[in-house]
Amino acid sequence: MTEKTISAEQVAILADRVDTLLINLSKMEGLIQGMSAQQNTLSNSSAILQERLVSFDANQRRLFQLSDEHADSIKQISSELKVHSWTWKLVGTVAVSSLGLVGWAYTELRGLQGQDNRHENRLSILEFIVGGRSQPQPPKGNNP
């Protein structure tokens, strides 16, 4: 058998490689520990979210139960709201149309008032011609 001799250089190279390997191994252990800590944080957050989800589910079921219990009153209120909305639409329509009617009536009354004044003027002229009224006297005072 042939024996191989190991030189000091080879031992130094081997020791350097083992040191590099140990450094890389400690880095990987640190990374693995960091990942483990993050995984623990994530699992804790997941557990908290799961508890909240269960709570929300219970609250939602309670809400649906209350909704089912009050379904008749909700339907009644809904139908009343529908009636009231149509009533207010009708009232609004009547109010808008009455504004138009008031405007038209105001215009007609002004026209009739103008006609009354014209008839009053005609009546005054006829009375004057017939002699029913006295002729207006000029104001007394200094004549220019």
Image (spheres, grey):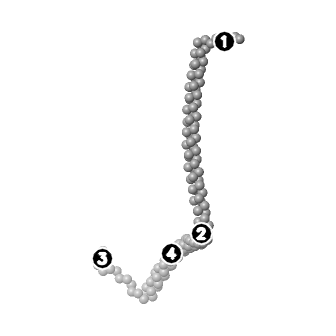
Which quadrant holds the N terminus? top right
**Residue nearer the viewer, 76 or 126:** 76
Q: How far apart are the two marked residues, 4 and 2, measured between alpha carbons?
A: 53 Å
Mark 2 highlights which residue? 70
Mark 1 highlights which residue? 4
Residue 94 at least partly seen: yes
Q: Residue at x 59, y 53 (%)?
A: 53
Mark 4 highlights which residue? 106
Q: Nearer the viewer, mark 2 or mark 3?
A: 2
Relative image position of residue 83 (x, y in whole percent): 59, 72
- Under mark 4, the amino acid is Tyr
Relative image position of residue 6 (x, y in whole percent): 62, 12
Mark 1 or mark 4: whose residue is earlier in sequence: 1
As helix, strand or loop, the secondary structure at mark 1 comes to loop
Q: Nearer the viewer, mark 3 or mark 4?
A: 4
- Under mark 2, the amino acid is His
Q: How far apart are the two marked residues, 1 and 4, measured between alpha carbons?
A: 128 Å
Q: Residues within 10 Å of mark 2 (few under 14, many from 20)?
A: few
Residue 104 at least partly seen: no
Q: How far apart are the two marked residues, 1 and 2, measured between alpha carbons?
A: 94 Å
Q: Residues within 10 Å of mark 3 (few under 14, many from 20)?
A: few
Mark 3 or mark 4: whose residue is earlier in sequence: 4
Q: How far apart are the two marked residues, 3 and 4, measured between alpha carbons?
A: 46 Å
Mark 3 highlights which residue? 143
As helix, strand or loop, the secondary structure at mark 4 comes to helix
Q: Nearer the viewer, mark 3 or mark 1?
A: 1
Q: Quadrant of residue 33?
A: top right
Q: How far apart are the two marked residues, 3 and 1, measured between alpha carbons?
A: 161 Å
Mark 4 or mark 2: whose residue is earlier in sequence: 2
Residue 83 vertical position relative to residue 28 in the rendered view, above or below = below
